[in-house]
Image (tube, rainbow, N blue to C red):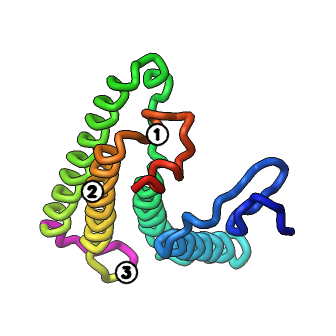
Amino acid sequence: MTVPGVPQHQIEDDNETIDLSDIRWHDGLVLFVFWLLFSVVFLQFFTRYVLNDSLGWTEEIARYLLIAVTFIGAVMAVRKEAMIAVEIFYRWMSRPVRRVVQAFVDLVAVVFYGSMAFSCVRLAQRTRQKMVSIEVSKSFVYWGVAICFACMFLLAIWILIKHLRTGTSPLIDPEVPIDASSQSE
């Protein structure tokens, strides 16, 4: 249904608007890994409770797929600037103080993601242990997490630069729509 004044890439459902223009290819990657996780867990359930003979590898693989969903989803959350924040404190601060606090928070995020990427790389390089159920090195899991943290690090740098250049963010100016800060570039 076409509604005058509403962009075609939005869906309206009971006064809630869902913006589909912010979907990227790695959002599909999260969805794919999630469905892979769902399939493995269903296979585990089916073999354990229906066939009464569980497959040994499903529990361990489900654990590693859950880790993958978590960290790929975290990359998506950083890209959308959807990480948690204590917004009540921002309401009590003046706008110049909010800008300084936002820059500090962005800088802390950059340092955190960078240090976690570095730590994961070091851990992956030192890991020689194999998975219990299949003959694959556990370092692949750590390399995957390191790649996700490296992506979050790069995105956090981009977000820091964007907030410094535009002078605004959803926490600095909550009355400005989220898309307005990215459209002013």
User: Is there CB contact under 8 Å for labels 1 and 3?
Assistant: no
Measured Cα–Cα span from mark 1 to mark 3: 37 Å
**Of pointers 1 and 3, the one earlier in the residue sequence:** 1
Quick one: quadrant of the N terminus?
bottom right
- Badge 3: how crowded within 10 Å, few (<14), some, or many (20+)? few
Residue 158 picture location, percent across and down? 30, 56
Q: Nearer the viewer, residue 49 or 21?
A: 21
Q: Quadrant of the C terminus?
A: bottom left
Instruction: Report the amino acid beneath label 1.
Output: Ile
Q: Amino acid at mark 2?
A: Phe
Report whether residue 58 is seen.
Answer: no
- Label 1 vs label 3, nearer the camera: 1
Residue bearing mark 1: 84
The first of marks 2 and 3 along the sequence is 3
Mark sitting on residue 134: 3
Which x, y percent locates residue 130? 27, 75
- Residue, disc 2: 153
Q: Is residue 127 magenta?
A: yes
Specify whether 90 is left or right of 116: right
**Secondary structure found at label 3:** loop
Of tags 2 and 3, which is closer to the observer?
A: 2
Which residues fall within the magenta stretch? 126-133
